[in-house]
Image (tube, grey):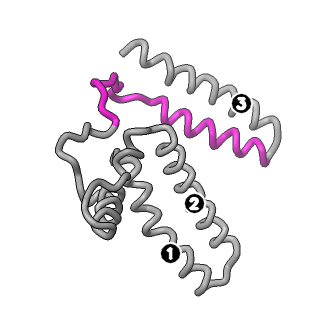
Amino acid sequence: MAEEVRFFLRGLVYLVPITVVYWLVSKEPAGTALLVALVVGFVAVIGLVLLHASSAAAELRPRSGGIAGRLLGAVNRAIGFHERVDAPPPLEGGPDLIPTGSPWPLITAASIVVAGLGLIFGTWLLLPGLALLAWALLGWLTQLDRA
């Protein structure tokens, strides 16, 4: 099973008890609802990956031994305590083109702030913020062609 799926499984092992304890101790509905939404999101990601990746689902099937041994082996493989030697590295791919220094992320962030303030203070600030955002995104995307 890919390390990405194990990450979400380990996250569930942590989040489910934390959500229950948070609800029992605080009785605060907003935080509990956010934690429950996070648990549902983790379950959805795991479900989609296992649905579409037959190789990941095949690793969860019990192999040999008694019922307890097969169950424990499946849990260990799912959580990541047992790593197969012949398993491919997660998200294996070739080298990607990564640009070096760039001002575009900073300009994009500033334009998002200006556009967000424009939603509060009015159109006179929103329109320049959106124009700056379009310019920043265009510059950020076209820098990859020049690298």
110, 45: nearer the viewer: 45
Local packing at callout 1 (Cα closer than 10 Å; few below 14, some 14-19, many 20+) is some
Report helix, strand or loop for mark 2: helix
Is residue 105 highlighted in magenta?
yes
- Of the numbered discs 1 and 3, the one sitting upstream in the chain is 1
Residue bearing mark 1 = 18
* Left or right of 125, for residue 102: left
Amino acid type assigned to the residue bearing label 2 in the image: Leu
Q: Which span is picked out in magenta?
A: 91-120
Report helix, strand or loop for mark 3: helix
Quadrant of the rendered image containing residue 23: bottom right
75, 102: nearer the viewer: 75
Give the alpha-carbon distance from disc 1 to disc 2, as whole Å: 11 Å
Give percent across and percent down for residue 143: 44, 18
Amino acid type assigned to the residue bearing label 3 in the image: Pro
Q: Which mark is residue 77?
A: none
Q: Where's the C terminus, which quadrant?
A: top left
124, 24: nearer the viewer: 24
* Left or right of 29, for residue 137: left
Outermost residue to the top: 146
Amino acid type assigned to the residue bearing label 1 in the image: Ile
Give the alpha-carbon distance from disc 2 to disc 3, as whole Å: 36 Å
Report helix, strand or loop for mark 1: helix
* Left or right of 23, for residue 62: left
Local packing at callout 2 (Cα closer than 10 Å; few below 14, some 14-19, many 20+) is some
- Which residue shows up at 41% across the image and 46% down it? 57
Residue bearing mark 2 = 38
- Which residue shows up at 67% across the image and 68% down it? 33
* Left or right of 71, for residue 42: right
Residue bearing mark 3 = 128
